[in-house]
Amino acid sequence: MAISRRAESLDLGVTLPGEEGRRSLGGHLRRWLPLGLGILMAVAMIVLAAAAPLIAPLSPSAQYSDAVLKGPGAVERHMLGTDEFGRDILSRIIWGARVSLQVGLASVFWGFLVGVPLGILAGTRGGAVETAIMRCADMLMAFPTLLLALIIVTALGGTLANEIMAIGIALTPNFVRLARSLALTIREQDYIMAARALGSGQLRVMARHVFPNALYALVVVATLYIATAIRTEASLSFLGLGIPPPTPSWGNILSEGRQYIKCCPWITTFSGLAIMLAVLAFNLVGDALRDLLDPRLRGE
Amino acid sequence: MFQYVARRVLVAVPMLLGAMSIVFFAMRILPGDPCVSMMGDQATREALADCTKNLGLHRPLAVQYVDYLWRSVQLDFGNSLRQGYPVSEYIARMFPHTLVLVMSSAVVAGLVGIPIGIVSALKRRSPLIDYPLRIFALLGLSMPVFWLGILLLIVFSLRLDIFPLIGGGDLEGVLHMLRTGEALSSPGDFLAAVGDVLHHLVLPAFALGFTLAATISRLSRSAMLEVISQDYIRTARAKGQGERAVVYKHAFRNMMVPLLTIIGLFVAVALTGTVLTETVFTRPGLGKMLVDAIGARDYPLAQGAITVFTMTIIFVNLVVDMLYAVVDPRITYR
């Protein structure tokens, strides 16, 4: 088994200087295609959600009594068919994107906003502060994301704001842990010592030095958590604990369609497909960003 | 070793305590009076007061909290509001169903995920093998288990009529036969009952297993990549060992160590998955019990289910921590 220099550099997951220039067209394509595809899908989804009133062919709540439980294309105006109330599935899915994306983005933003400062504080300060913060995070980590979100939503009731808060709280300990572990490495760097020697206070060190250096890894992971949040929201709605009908969300469209899988499988098929594509989009972007930005995090 | 175990247990205790406190207080801020949901809106004031007293809800919150903790440790979660039976009895009945589902899906996930991860790592960057397998893993990771479950039901239960649409088979019967020794005296009946349970298990185990296989394949891929670049692999190759022996004798065993650590994570994800899987397949189990209990506002039942979920996860993590130290002697027992 010959071990060439090039094979070694690939095995280590690093690019040697000069290798970049040698990449073939196929290499570039493999590198950028997942990211491009993911961004395209995510942007398409965001546009769809933002412009739902303009894009959706019909109202998501309008009932067409002449087209109850019709298959895709059976009635011309209903491209993806209708549900048991004669509502247009395509329009409901387009409007449902709003709930999924709002919850996905806002809950990750919440988790980031609360978790990252706490994690950086724990990692930089150390001592009793760190112990207190990390023990609280561990306690929340004992619950899987969906279970914790489920408990909180059950306690508070299924509204959009509560769902965002529930998933946000469930994601927070993940951000705390990651930010802390990044801060632990960063605080040992020479530039932190230099900043301290120059008289920077604790807060300044954390805000101006630790945070910016941890930011890229945090953003990559945040992208992946958007996928988790979207899936969690869909799961809650599927279990009947999310946004109550008639407001369309992908999870509750799918849940309502469950009773009709025998006659009308299109209701569950298309709403589930929407969930999968949305989760896939953010997984693609997060994965590709991680590969591009940080070889150390690869394959984690 | 003893010190290490003691340390781990001591860390797990406050975690469990904290998690149980979260469950307790979350259940206390739930909207609606449990007595009203139990007896209906028409109940008289006296009846409601009586019920509140019977459930011990008239006591100060702190007393209720300590009482809940003390009873939970003894696995006493009170009585179900709907049926009146002890919650622990329900849990004991439902736990085997969930356990069987988690274990069988773990088998599916391992059998599908580990080989995919290994092949994908060994044929790294091969456009015909690695990339399709990674896309497969990404799809599995993005596919919600309840959707996959419904698709499987549509194809295999409704269209092809190969597998049952609902239920979990007579698992209690099987366990009863095992306990009474009937399994040996009438092996025919026993095998038929086991067959029925397995028949009901195929689709749920595959649905949950497939979504978990995606995670497993990614982790085994990175574990294999890590191992394959180690010096001892190079040594094995240098001394002229065949590639097969290098992979299976040297790389595979070492790759399993990092995989072991994720068993804890796996159980957590799988248990959450059972909530969705059991709901989709209308299968008895802890997950479905939890969802039904929440729907019916049966708080003691929901509280018991969540507590058991959390206890299981913390316990499994504790065991994994210890196993890890046993398997990898480099871990020091600090």
Image: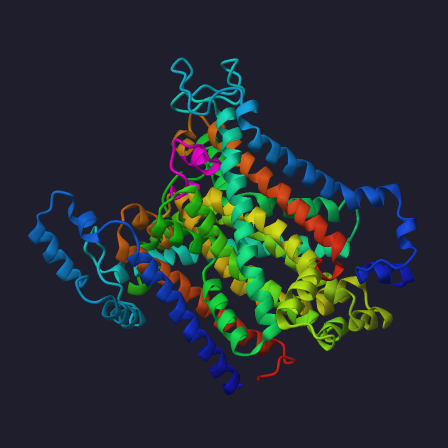
Is residue B66 located in the magenta-colored stretch of the structure? no
Tell me if A253 is positioned left or right of A124 in this view. left
Please determine whether, in this image, residue B257 is positioned above or below residue B333.
above
Q: Is residue A200 visible?
A: yes
Asked whether B290 or B101 is in front, the reply is B290
Asked whether A49 or B205 is in front, the reply is A49
Q: At x 49% / y 60%, what residue is drawn?
A: B267
Q: Quadrant of residue A12?
A: bottom right
Residue B199: percent from the left, percent from the top? Answer: 43, 46
Please determine whether, in this image, residue A126 is positioned above or below residue A24.
below
Asked whether B172 or B119 is in front, the reply is B119
Work out which quarter of the rendered image holds the C terminus of chain A and state it: bottom right
Q: At x 64% / y 38%, what residue is drawn?
A: A42
Q: How is the image coloured?
A: rainbow
Q: At x 38% / y 33%, what residue is drawn?
A: A245
Residue A218: percent from the left, percent from the top? Answer: 64, 57
Work out which quarter of the rendered image holds the N terminus of chain A and state it: bottom right
Residue A234: percent from the left, percent from the top? Answer: 48, 42
Please report the bounds of the magenta region as a residue range.
A237-255
Residue B202: percent from the left, percent from the top? Answer: 47, 46
Task: Farthest residue to the front: give it.
Answer: A199
